[in-house]
Amino acid sequence: MIEIPTDLPADLVPLSWLIGVWEGTGVVDYRVGDAHFEGEFTHRVSFSHDGGPYLNYAATAWLAADGERPAQQLVAETGFWRLSRPATAATPGPGLLPALETAPIRTADDVEQLRTDGGGFEIEVNLVHADGVSELYLGEVKGPRIDIATDAVVRTAAAKPYAAATRMYGLVDGHLLWAWDIAALGREMGSHASARLARVD
């Protein structure tokens, strides 16, 4: 059963099942030429909200130590998840520019108008990685399942080659399951990691 916080903005109701702190383990398995990257990692993901029409996101993953190598951080990323809604005069920004009009209070009926013909809601996800990669994902949330794919990837000159990605998230038996496919290091899109997480807060 999904409990929706009473102070949640209407735009976040379709994403409300994500809210909380999730921890668990996963497996990375990615081969590029003669190099094979594999191992079990621990993963911590946090989805929260601060009253705005978006979810705050933060995640870290650590490769478990083995007899040959110490534990190492694999990823640290932060970002924002939201329903896809066109900007209006009531939308603040860009930068510190205020809205030109007062935003109306959104209701469940307003959000329902955003539902796609397939029964879901289009979403936008902006993620920034500590290793110099930034991603814009577009996709859909439909009940307790989310499918997103990169629309744009930007990386610094020092970042490793990373061209595209897809991610899938699902709520199964109270656990957050996800899978992440990437096109990186000159390889075409392929499976690279998956995890099963339990809500801890």
Image (cartoon, helix red, strand yellow):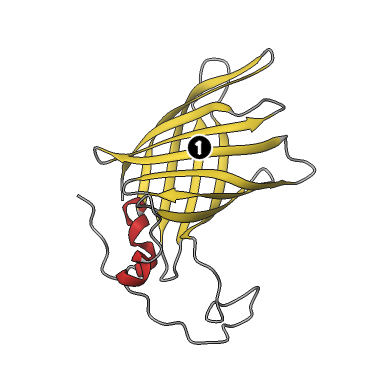
Q: Secondary structure at mark 1?
A: strand
On the image, the x and y values in percent for residue 64 come to: 49, 26
User: Compared to 151, does 56 lie above or below?
Assistant: below
Q: Is residue 189 left or right of residue 65?
A: right
State the residue at coordinates (27%, 64%).
5
Task: Tell me the quarter of the picture where residue 185 sits.
Answer: top right
- The answer to which of 58 and 71 lies nearer the viewer is 58
Q: Residue furthest top?
A: 34
On the image, the x and y values in percent for residue 49 come to: 41, 63
Looking at the rendered structure, the number of numbered marks drawn on it comes to 1
Task: Tell me the quarter of the picture where residue 94 sits.
Answer: bottom right
Amino acid type of the residue that numbered disc 1 sits on in the rendered structure? Ala
Task: Tell me the quarter of the picture where residue 188 sits.
Answer: top right
The residue beneath circle 1 is 61
State the residue at coordinates (36%, 71%).
110
On the image, the x and y values in percent for residue 42 come to: 44, 33
Q: Residues within 10 Å of mark 1 (few under 14, many from 20)?
A: many
